[in-house]
Each structure stands twice: as C-alpha cells, then as structure tokens.
Image (cartoon, rainbow, N blue to C red):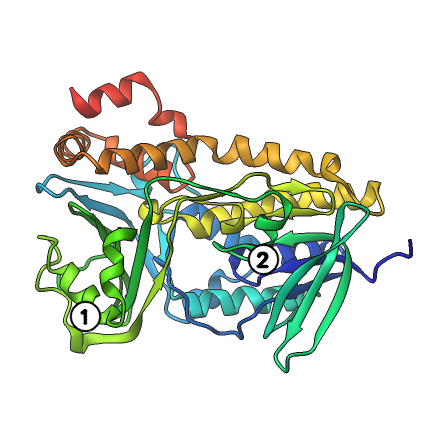
Amino acid sequence: MSAPPLDVLVLGAGPAGSASATLLARAGLRVLVVDRDTFPREKACSEYLSPEAVRVLDRLGVTRTLEAAGAAPLLGTVVTASRGATLEGRFARAVPAPARPTGLSVARRLLDAALVDAARHAGATVHERATVAALLEEGGRVAGAVLREAGGRTRALRARLVIGADGLRSLAARRIGGVRRAWPRRVAFVAHVADVPGLAASAQMHVGPDGYVGLNPLGGGVANVALVTRAARARAAAGDATGFFLRELERFEGVRGRVRGDAIVRAVLATGPFGVRARRVVADGALLVGDAADFFDPFTGEGICTALRGAELLEPVVRAALAAEAMPGARALAPYAAARRRTFAGKWAVERLIGRAMEWPALFDHAVGRIGRRRGMADTLVGVTGDFVPARAVLNPWFLARMVV
C-alpha cells in the first residue's frame, strides 16, 4: 500500500476541527480540513465561553483577535427556576480559581472564522464548500473520504488518519459505529436581538415547564437569545420559526416583554434534536471530536469548551500514534478515548443531573433556591459547568444533600 499524501484529514472546520488542525499542523503534520460552509458563517449556538474555553483559545492564539472584534467578558451565570428561585455563580469566586476571572461571549461567525484562520496560519490547508459524501475504507479500516465539491465533482482523498469533527449529524460517527439517541429530546431556536433590557455581564438562564431560555450579552447592545424546547413542541414552528420563537419566549416569566420581533438583527436559526452520543470515538484509522462524539444538552453552555478540550486531548495521542504506525489502528488511538472519559465523565453526569432535575419543577426550584442562598455553592456549580472546577465538587453527598435539605 503506498503512503497517502495526507497525515490527517479533518472533516469539519468548526471549533473542534479547526482547533485539532491547528495543534496537529503546529506539530509538523500534513493536515487538510474540509467543510461544506464558507467562513465566516452563522451558526445556531449559545455563543458562551467559560474561562477554561478561553484558556484554550489563548493557546490557539485567537483571544486577542476576538476581544478586538468586540467579544464581551462574562462574569458567570444567573439561573432562574420556573417558580422564581434564583442563583448567581461567578467564575472568579469559585475554588479553585480559573485561569482568568471572566469568560467570553462571542458570535460564532467571529469565533469560527478566527479559528479557521489560526489553522491556516499553523500550516493546515482548509478546503471550504466541500461535502463529505462517504468515508473511504481499505482492509476494514478508514483510509480517507470522498468529497463532493461545489460544482458537483467528486474526488477521493486518502489519509493516514481521519478526524470526524462534523457535528451533531456526523457522518463519521454513523459510519464507524453508529450513535445512541438519549432523553431528553430538545431543539434550540437562536437569534441575535438588540436592546434586550435587564442584561448585565453574566449569562442568564430562565427555566420553564417545557425547556429554558438563555440570554447572553454579545456586546454592542446585542444579545444571543436561545430558546430550547421539547422536540415534540418544536414541531409547531414549521413554516414560522420566528413567530414560534417570539410566542414561546412570552411563556417565560423572566423573559416576557423583553424580546421584540422588530429588534431581531439576525434571523432565528434552529438546531437539534440533542441527546446524541457516538457508540465509539475511535476506530481503525479514525476518531471523533466535538459534537460528533457527544452532544447532550446546551443548558450548561459548554459545547465549545468540550470541542476545544477534545482537540487538546487528541493532539498528543495522534502525534504518538502516527509516529508509531504508518496507518494507526484503534488500539493506538485508544488513549484518546480514555482521556475523554477521565476529562468529561463527571461533567456529563452533572449535565444529566441538571437535565433530569428540570423535569421536576418543584424540585428544581427548591434546589436552585438552596444553592443560591448558601455561600459558595452557586460559584462551585458554575465552576463545574465551566470545566475548571472538578465535578466531584458537586457530585458528593455533602453538596447534593445541601441542595435539598
């Protein structure tokens, strides 16, 4: 078998794909990234970055670019339950302290474009407007991909390793092992809205009977407004996503009257359903990162951080695997899967705990009230969901008991 021209083929140029490409290209590997979109592009997302996510952006060299473009600092998160209880967690007050006292709120069109530029600057080639039609297989292993370009022409690209960073509906995940669908099934509707009153320098989460709303100040008088609701309820949005979005917002006490239709400055975008996990994240010749590997629910707002951290986790494993084998197999890539479990298992448990609790409004309101009134608990919770405080700070009998007693 002749050696392929590429070391790594990355499918998807979002945060996970571009960050992976940057780190691997800096290590001297031949990297090609493909994406069906062109950049900058709009993307349905909470556009929320914790201090841990910003730490990775610092490593990638894009934080100053984003701040110069208007990224807004975030102090933490305020959560309001459906029956009125509130908690406010600040990053800077958590123990251990984060690498920096604030996170960032930044539009994905700016973030993704900056990360793509970083990948190019590192030496990776980025090929836009190219759809992945299929994965190439040779001898039972992934050996590249078939691309369909903008003009309809297809071509096959071989690579020593394929990284699936192709998002929530990942073709790579489906091909190397399939996906699991998990409860709860929710869909998000996201818009940019001007002149939303009552915003400060923290993100706001308002929980209701069928989902929740996130308000995130993007700077310049514009906010990211995200409605997350049950997939079954979201079917009513067919043909009029904006009307549905505005009507549903009025069902949330803390949001009612704050979002005007004539103040929407970027059209309502939809994404979901959530609750997807790949059955395996490594295979012979391939691995998954970002939403392609796992996407549960955006309540904690840390999908971008998970994508960036995933890139950091795969970089040393990929370098070692490619140095040891011409065409690395699943065994050589297995340390990446283990690293993901060590890094994210606690966070996944906290996400699922919050998701379950929201299904019981009285319990959720009680827990939010307890956490909000007891010194340090809200800061700890926000630190855990922000990925810089270990999950065991929440997943222990003392903390859980104080939530309800």
- Is residue 356 positioned above or below 215 on the image? above
Is the C-beta separation of discs 2 and 1 under 8 Å? no
Count neighbours of disc 2 (C-alpha within 10 A) and say few if under 14, some if 14 to 19, many if 20 or more: many
Name the residue located 11 percent from the left edge and 60 percent from the top edge: 250
Amino acid type shown at disc 2: Gly
| Residue with the most extreme right position | 2
Q: Secondary structure at mark 1?
A: helix
- Res 60 visible: yes
User: Helix or strand or loop: what does disc 2 sit on?
Assistant: helix
From the viewer's side, name the closer residue of 240 and 84: 240
- Taking the spot 38% from the left edge, 66% from the top edge, the residue there is 107
Amino acid type, label 1: Gly
Does the rendering let one see residue 230?
Answer: no
Residue at 60% of width from left, 32% of height from top? 338
Q: Whole-percent x and y of residue 310?
A: 55, 45
Task: Give the camera-side residue of 338 and 93.
Answer: 338
> Mark 2 or mark 1, which is nearer to you?
1
Identify which residue is drawn at 16% across, 60% down.
Answer: 249
Frontmost residue, 60 versus 25: 25
**Above or below, 96 relative to 205:** above
Q: Which residue is mark 1?
A: 243
Q: Label 1 neighbourhood size at 10 Å, few (<14), some (14-19), many (20+)?
A: some
Question: Which mark is on residue 281?
Answer: none
Give the Cα distance between marks 2 and 1: 34 Å
Q: Position of residue 296 (x, y in %)?
A: 40, 44
Q: Residue furthest bottom?
A: 151
Question: Would residue 190 be found to the left or right of residue 338 on screen?
Answer: left
Q: Give the percent coordinates (x, y) of residue 138.
A: 80, 51
Q: What mark, if any, has residue 17 been given in the picture?
A: 2
Of labels 2 and 1, earlier in sequence is 2
**Residue 380 location, x and y as percent?**
31, 33
- Position of the C terminus by quadrant: top left
